Amino acid sequence: MSNNITLKKGLDIPIKGAAELKTSKAIMPGVVALCPSDFKGLNPRLLVREGDRVLAGSPVLADKKCPDILFTSAVSGTVEQVVRGDKRKLLAVLVKADEVQEYLDFGVKEVSDLSAAEIKETLLKSGLWAGMIQRPYGIIADPAVKPKAIFVSAFNTAPLAADLEYALSGEAEAVQAGVKALAKLTDGGVHVSLCEEQYSSSPLHKLEGATLHTFSGKHPAGNVGVQISHISPIKKEETVWTVSLVMLAAIGKLFLTGKYDLRRKVAVTGPMASEPSYIETVPGMPMKEIAGFCAETEGVRVVSGDVLSGAAVGAEGYLRFQDNQITLIKEGTKKELLGWARPFRFNQYSADHTYFNWCLGWLMPNKKYAMDTNLHGGPRAFVMSDAYYGKVLPMDIYPLYLIKACLAGDIEKMEKFGIYEVLPEDLALCEYIDPSKMYIQDIIENGINQMLKEMA
Amino acid sequence: MNKIFEKGGKLYWLHSSVDAFETFLHVPGTVTRKGAHVRDAVDLKRIMIIAVIAAIPAALFGMWNTGYQHSLAIGATPAFWSDFFYGLLKVLPLYVVAYIVGLGIEFASSQIRNEEVNEGYLVSGFFIPLIVPVDVPLWMLAIAVAFAVIFGKEVFGGTGMNIWNPALLTRAFLFFSYPSQMSGSDCWVALRSGETAIDGFTGATPLAVAADQGAGAVDFMSMFLGTIPGSVGETSVIAILIGAVILLWTGVASWKIMLSSVAGALAIGGLAQLCGGTDIPCYYQLVMGGFAFGTVFMATDPVTSAQTECGKWIYGFFIGAVCVIVRLFNPGYAEGMMLAILLGNTFAPIIDHCVVNAHISKKNKTVKIA
């Protein structure tokens, strides 16, 4: 394909524990959680009480700011518990699932016959609107706005990420229906980015009604933010929406079957996964259900999402709404004698040339490392130059300038250096390679939160 | 860490220092709290130690050369090991003073700021003895180091926040406070008390000689090898090139800065030669004085150099050019590298500012058209 975009910057972290392409287990959890923390900026209003009966698709929460946006139950059953934290903050709504699932009927609809307003209404009612993410800021899309365009990344380059071609095999029809539906919500069209290597084998290259792009390169080439910045960068006062391919398939299924069906294949990965493979489940699944996949019972961090920007939900946590990957890694609490001073550290990976793993990469290109959560150093002020961080960020921005603007809380500079174009996940690799061991994603997150507050 | 050094313990105020020693021995068992759950094995300690390793050949050569120059000065037959040990005994006190004073202030400041001790001074402290004349009185060095570390670095917030290279600031302080001990033909050779140089030996650096008597009076090869009077570590281009290879191979220093600095020096040196401003061949500029050491070790300091890729080209060229301009057209100073780099440090943020702004306005324009 001629308009392929090749990204030279980036880094694929050679971490152990990629999921084998097989589904080892279908898990229908006994209890499923709906957590408001899965949705950025959500101020929830509770719509159910303990003991209420819900179907898959029945509203459980609503957004206080925009009451049309509903968050619905992924399964049918009874509301078992409303979990609250400090100051009665709503943490989760637990639904005890039925043996046989019942779905609320939203009606089978032919997408091409529907108007934009009808599509919006169906999405809002069903709870799938929560899958629509607005950029800038990464919050749930505002239904009153007409976005410049809608972007979908059809491949994932994050470490150990689920292979979307496998995870969504057989759902090409649903994706097609989803694309058709979303195309009505914008004048700029739906832009789907495919991986160049898989272009011809992917059933998505025949997608109708979408503008296709192909990308090749290392992570973060699969991040939708990076793709947007190469297709059509976000300017001030512009809004675009993004939706993950998994959610797009769910949207398609809603129109094809009339059901709110969030079942998906989730990759259980990481060095601590005893049998890295896929499971079939729904979001909100308690991590207890996958205890059998853990190689060790103590000192393992359970991450919902990938290892760079997932959330450490813990063994008692739940699979997040958007995620289709779980990563299990060891807590790196062990001290390493003279670690930094050793000429070689064969079991630790470094992309930096001061270690010699990059030479090792030639000799053993398939060597994978059992990485743990050790910080490998202490926090320092930034010492290395902007270009050091820029080599893993294939976007047209100066990462260190943006980070420092966020640290300083300078709105004008944040705007100038491209805060509208990024979400924390896009700078995750900068955080990974940072020798100063700063929490860069957190800094960006705080910058975005400040923007949200000041722009409101 | 012992309990009394932890929060709430009696000696908590000392925790920065204890922590510094502890993390020197071990990579600590700290885990990531949020964000990226795994981190690269590299840390600043590793990057800094590479910079130190890269300067070791220059330091060792400097020690030998100190003894060698001494032998020449008193008319003795040079002998490798005795020359080396003579130099070692002369240079070691410089190291002791530079590290004790500098690290002392660094530890105290970290404690006041309640931060971990930054390893940046390990590098500065290693470079400082290499860029001063071997005969500099130790008390002067101590004052200069204290000035550079306090006013060049700690007042800005420590390593990573400084505007000027602390090692060069030390030298600049010495140069302007005690000019008589920092230039001329006596300071570069260390004699024992009572010894006098034999007739016909000159302790002047080739840079001063060439400025005085023309290019014919200096020898390219001895300047390249480094068997000449000069600051401890700056004389041997070969030893510095070994360091350059290490720095570039490991990616610690920027090749763009090094290359453009060389280009800048050659350009101005060549221009001056063509116009008849000087009879010194332009490539002599690369091996004379502190140019090589400054280009490889000082200009490439990631904190004080330009941040952007394009800015690095401009910054390096600027330094090389200014260095040669000072050498050729300023009657007051024989050497211009120190001033050129400090000036480069001063202008680096402006260079970056222009590069970044130009880039952003260009980006905004292209998008508007599309």
Image (cartoon, rainbow, N blue to C red):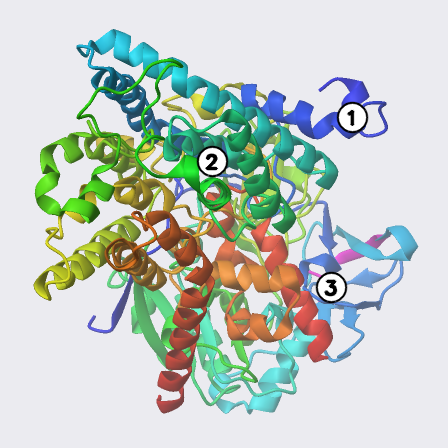
Classify mark 2: residues with Cα within 10 Å, few (<14), some (14-19) or many (20+). Answer: many
Amino acid on which the number 1 mark rests in the picture: Glu
Residue A16 seen by the camera: no
Left or right position of B250 against A137: left
Mark 1 near mark 2, Cβ–Cβ under 8 Å?
no
| Viewer-closest of A135 and B172 | B172
Quadrant position of the C terminus of chain B in the picture: bottom left
**Image point (24%, 63%), residue name:** A200
Q: Position of residue B269 (x, y in %)?
A: 17, 57
Dot placed on the residue nearer the N-terminal end, 1 or 2: 1
Residue A129 in magenta stretch: no
Q: Which mark is residue B124?
A: 2
Amino acid on which the number 3 mark rests in the picture: Leu
Classify mark 3: residues with Cα within 10 Å, few (<14), some (14-19) or many (20+). Answer: many
Q: Secondary structure at mark 1?
A: loop
Q: Position of residue B220 (x, y in %)?
A: 11, 38
Amino acid on which the number 2 mark rests in the picture: Ser
Mark pair 2, 3: CA separation: 67 Å
Residue A417 seen by the camera: yes
Q: Are marks 2 and 3 on the same chain?
A: no
- Residue named by callout 1: B6
The boundaries of the magenta stretch are A72-82
**Considering only vertical position in the picture, is A194 above or below B132?**
below
Q: State which chain disc 2 sits on.
A: B
Q: Which mark is residue A55?
A: 3
